[in-house]
Image (cartoon, grey):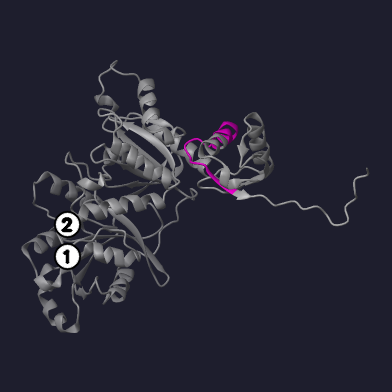
Amino acid sequence: MARGADLPVIAIVGRPNVGKSTLFNRFVGRRRALVRDVPGVTRDRLYGQVSFERWQARVIDTGGFDPSSVEPLIEGVRRQILTALEEADLVLFVVDARDGVTALDAEIARALRRTGRPVVLAANKVDGPGQEPGLADLYRLGVGEPVPVSAEHGRGVAELLEVLRARAPQSFAAPARLGAPAHVAVIGRPNVGKSSLVNAMVGAERVLVHPDPGTTRDAVDTTLVYEGRAYVLVDTAGIRRKGRVHEPLEKLAVVMALRSLERCQVALVVLDASEGVTAQDAHIAGYADQGGRATVLVVNKWDLVPHGMVRKAEVVEQVRDRLPFLEHAPVCFTSAVRGDGVPEIFDTIDEVATEFGRQIGPAEVTATLRAAIERRPVSVGGAPLVLQSASQVSTAPPTFALRVNKPDDIHSSYARYLVKSLRHAFGFAGTPIRLSLRKGAVRRARAGARRVRR
């Protein structure tokens, strides 16, 4: 069984719309999974960590389980659930207590018994003790005593966690330490191949891929190790123009996609090589830049471009022309379906993540910027620009504080020149650079200073 940490793994399964994602969010203590009162919201596997007193476990949220459906999208969801069951040490089977035992519940129970995994049965949507006598019918499922719980209101959650703690394996050998993983958000328009790219990087069907746009809804985290380096890949929903987003569920998915940028160091902005750079691509890339994330531009579906029709250098030139604010971002070419270009993506992620956290000493920064001002002097507020000092005040993204005589009068074009001077001197490939212009200290004549002789 695959195991990514020294914690027991619990898979949450059940038919659609019984409250699995609400319970998952209750366990992890924050809104990681989309919740909507319609079936089929969750499609991919979502991972989180639950802490209860001194006990911890990894939990996996899954889509609605329908063992017999042959519809392609539902079949893809089922594959995701079966993968979660293979990883799990314990299964949390969630049913809706108000519905009793449905035919689909019974079918899922039979499938779970065949896996041989231990199962804990959670009777969800029990909002008060008056409903508990009706739980006797759930014994017919043959998976043990039902534990009453209300995921929405938190009732019975502590008792359920006590049962899970008692049934879960207690310890595993600790894995080798790999250091903090690089968090990478994969963003882009719908159907540019984000999920296919994540699967190619993982080397397995980690996220569901389907020809219809909008298959991915949650921001799906995937932890992996590639050549001794740890990564967390966050596959996100496709981001469309606001005017085209009408469904509440899609609006929530887009919000979660943008929030994923806040917890990542690197953004992979995926472009479709067969369509070129669109206005929406520029809009999405702007989110990464404005959010201060290190950025890699990934030209996917390169296999769909006829050989010899266009050179990579010409595509890079088009990308630079249409995304001038990301001229510092490296460009990678991939074919997710063939796996081409994946090693180069990992190398590039490592490079920009390192630059994202790079620190430069104040003496070097001051000397570099003073030399830049000497090469191209400028007048601000009627006086020459004077740099008193400069230092890097933070990383991720690299931010520099400049103390000058007229900070409010420096034109944005000159500020961009100073940023380019820092890049030329120190690199910072793939990462935005922020300047903080501050008023320098005013020097006053000392009292009792010597008078100048006539």
Percent coordinates x, y for residue 350 in the rendering = 47, 38
Percent coordinates x, y for residue 349 in the rendering = 44, 38
Farthest residue in the top direction? Answer: 308
Q: Residue at left 31%, top 50%? A: 257
Question: On the rendered structure, is 341 left or right of 18?
Answer: right
Residue 64 numbered tag:
2
Question: On the rendered structure, is 391 left or right of 351?
Answer: right
Q: In the figure, residue 48 lies in which quadrant? A: bottom left
- Residue closer to the observer: 161 or 431: 431
Question: What amino acid is labelled 2 in the image?
Answer: Gly
* Circle 1 SS class: loop
* Circle 2 SS class: loop
Q: Badge 1 is on which residue?
A: 18
Question: What amino acid is labelled 1 in the image?
Answer: Val
Q: Which residues are magenta?
A: 419-437
Query: Does any portion of residue 400 appear in the rendered image?
Result: no
Q: Residue at left 48%, top 38%? A: 352
Q: Are marks 1 and 2 in contact (CB under 8 Å)?
A: yes
Residue 397 numbered tag:
none
Q: Is residue 161 above or below residue 200?
A: below
Query: Does any portion of residue 197 appear in the rendered image?
Result: yes
Query: First in sequence: mark 1 or mark 2?
Result: 1
